[in-house]
Image (tube, rainbow, N blue to C red):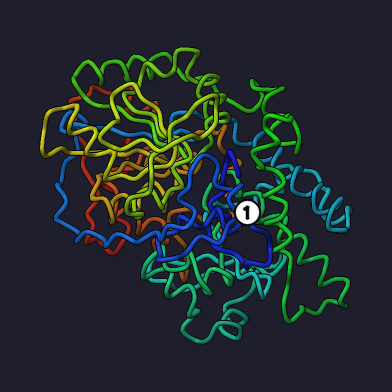
């Protein structure tokens, strides 16, 4: 099991990799049967259950204004939403841990991978790049699914080279399905062909992937291979880095560093954010924390960033939620927590304010919140940074409103004040996170499309929202807009 699950590991990989991969994907939103041995289902006897996919809600007309005061329940992701990291230091640590694993355990060339993680390195990185694992390519798509940029190794292909690989329409059957439904490649055969580096815990992997492919081609007299196994080896490396046992045992390099040097990797939560959380609760809002991290790591992170008494800010705390499965899985059990371990099942009717749980499902949590508010209909908001797990899925399948917390907005100065300290999130090689420039025209990326269709607003940090009055109204995204309308980006 894992304390942090990089999003790419939640995509189903080949069953030949290891049993833990199947465990990670047993909650995937398609109808699947868990194939995992019982030891990977700690504290639950639901390992044989079918997990059924909820049907998406129909998109309704979105209000043109957003106000926090309008919501009965407000939920938060933890990592990179409420709990902030020094991302430059964090990504350097992740890069070094994964590179060293590949050199030490998979016999990769150390001169190819053990290179400085400097400004030149971060220029190649961008969140949301898609891996064509067989061809050894990294892709960037526009909102319609067209493949606008491709890197093979560290070299970018020309438009003609892209057409030669993917056809004159600049499309690929696999990414076409992905753009139609962002969960369509989460499981099954398509998931073995592509992945996406969706969060900051796996984002440095794109540079390692590119450097490894570059070296392999060089050893093959500059010719690309018919098929690459680099990504399969990287998945093994991520498993090693984020194995749950390594947190308690102080192994795996990542967790020992995080625990030993918290000031290097974490950013303390500003007092005005904590006061803002208290103010929301004082307005009779139910606040809940819903994180994909395991209880030990999540507690360590929350305590470091929010303080020793961090639990006081939330009415419900959910660990190891296995998003997006939390929003799509029917009757996924809530598990009791004791001594940082998952134990027996808790019925959702037993959930009460002040209680923590592991796993679970959105429908049961909503019933518990309605009961605590003594209301039959409630309006729910969720704030997070992962565009598929935190924004797309709760909007489409659970009918929650969402707010995107997107550090790239400040890094690029995209309709907000530029933050020079976030320059490592800006890539001139891949163009803007929000658009792609071609023939002097800007095309929105698929991530901008998610913002417009599934989010109320996008902010660079929670700190901004906490600095404004709770009753402030904000202009929202127009979900029918096909261009680069920026009404939903704040601050202006």
Left or right: where does residue 353 sit relative to residue 304? left
Q: How many marks?
A: 1
Q: Is residue 156 left or right of residue 332?
A: right
Which corner quadrant of the image does residue 267 belong to? top right
Residue in the foreground of this view, choosing between 312 and 457: 312
Residue 278 sits above or below residue 40 on the image? above
Q: Nearer the viewer, residue 417 or 53?
A: 53
In the figure, 307 relative to 427: above or below? above
Residue linked to disc 1: 20
Is 345 left or right of 350, judged from the image as shown?
A: right
- Please tell me how crowded label 1 is: few (under 14), some (14-19), or many (20+) other residues with Cα within 10 Å: some
Residue 479 place in picture, x, y as percent? 23, 57
Point 54% across, 59% down: residue: 196
Instruction: Confirm whether residue 149 shows in the render.
Output: yes
Q: Residue at image x 45%, y 47%?
A: 386
Q: Under tag 1, what secondary structure?
A: helix
Can residue 442 be seen by looking at this rendering?
Answer: no
Q: Choose between 153 and 257: the one closer to the eye.
A: 257
Front one among 236 and 82? 236
Position of the N terminus, as image quadrant, is: top right
Relative to 279, 8 lies left or right = right
The C terminus sits in image quarter: top left
Q: Quadrant of residue 92?
A: top right
User: Residue at the spot x=64%, y=57% of the render?
Assistant: 19
The picture places residue 411, in percent across and down from the top left corner, at: 51, 40
Instruction: Find residue 274 and report its horizontal and vertical position in percent.
Output: 38, 17
Locate residue 250, reporting x and y percent. Answer: 74, 30
For residue 347, which quarter of the picture? top left
Instruction: Please determine whether, in this image, residue 158 is positioned above or below residue 473.
Output: below
Seen at 39% across and 59% down, the residue is 51
């Amino acid at each position: 099991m894992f304390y942090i699950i990089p999003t790419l590991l939640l995509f189903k990989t080949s069953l030949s990799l290891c049993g833990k991969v199947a465990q990670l994907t047993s909650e995937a939103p398609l109808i699947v049967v868990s194939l995992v041995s019982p030891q990977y289902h700690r504290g639950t006897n639901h390992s044989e259950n079918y997990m059924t996919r909820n049907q998406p809600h129909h998109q309704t007309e979105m209000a043109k204004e957003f106000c926090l005061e309008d919501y009965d329940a407000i939920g938060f992701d933890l990592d990179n939403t409420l709990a902030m990291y020094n991302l430059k230091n964090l990504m350097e640590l992740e890069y070094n841990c994964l590179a060293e694993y590949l050199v030490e355990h998979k016999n990769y060339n150390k001169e190819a991978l053990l290179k400085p993680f400097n400004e030149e390195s971060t220029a190649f990185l961008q969140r949301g790049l898609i891996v064509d694992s067989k061809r050894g390519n990294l892709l960037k798509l526009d909102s319609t699914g067209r493949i606008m940029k491709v890197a093979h190794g560290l070299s970018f292909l020309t438009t003609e080279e892209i057409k030669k690989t993917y056809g004159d329409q600049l499309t690929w059957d696999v990414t076409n399905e992905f753009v139609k439904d962002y969960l369509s490649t989460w499981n099954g055969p398509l998931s073995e062909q592509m992945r996406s580096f969706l969060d900051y815990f796996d984002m440095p992997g794109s540079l390692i992937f590119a450097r490894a492919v570059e070296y392999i081609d060089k050893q093959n007299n500059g010719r690309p291979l018919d098929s690459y196994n680099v990504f399969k080896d990287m998945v093994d490396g991520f498993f090693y880095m984020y194995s749950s046992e390594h947190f308690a045992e102080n192994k795996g390099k990542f967790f020992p560093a995080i625990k030993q040097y918290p000031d290097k990797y974490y950013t303390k939560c500003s007092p005005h954010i904590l006061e803002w959380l208290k103010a929301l609760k004082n307005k009779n809002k139910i606040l809940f924390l819903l994180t994909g991290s395991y209880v030990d790591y999540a507690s360590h992170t929350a305590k470091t960033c929010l303080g020793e008494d961090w639990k006081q800010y939330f009415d419900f705390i959910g660990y190891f939620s296995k998003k997006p499965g939390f929003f799509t899985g029917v009757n996924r059990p809530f598990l009791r927590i004791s001594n940082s371990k998952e134990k027996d099942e808790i019925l959702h009717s037993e959930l009460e304010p002040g209680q923590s749980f592991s796993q679970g499902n959105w429908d049961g949590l909503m019933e518990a919140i309605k009961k605590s508010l003594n209301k039959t209909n409630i309006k729910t908001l969720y704030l997070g940074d992962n565009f598929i797990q935190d924004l797309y899925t709760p909007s489409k399948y659970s009918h929650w409103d969402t707010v995107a917390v997107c550090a790239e907005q400040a890094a690029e100065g995209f309709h907000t004040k530029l933050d020079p300290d976030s320059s490592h999130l800006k890539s001139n090689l891949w163009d803007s996170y929000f658009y792609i420039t071609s023939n002097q025209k800007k095309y929105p990326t698929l991530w901008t499309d998610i913002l417009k269709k599934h989010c109320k607003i996008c902010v660079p940090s929670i700190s901004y929202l906490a600095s404004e009055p709770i009753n402030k109204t904000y202009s929202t995204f127009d979900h029918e807009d096909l261009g680069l309308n920026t009404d939903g980006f704040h601050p202006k």
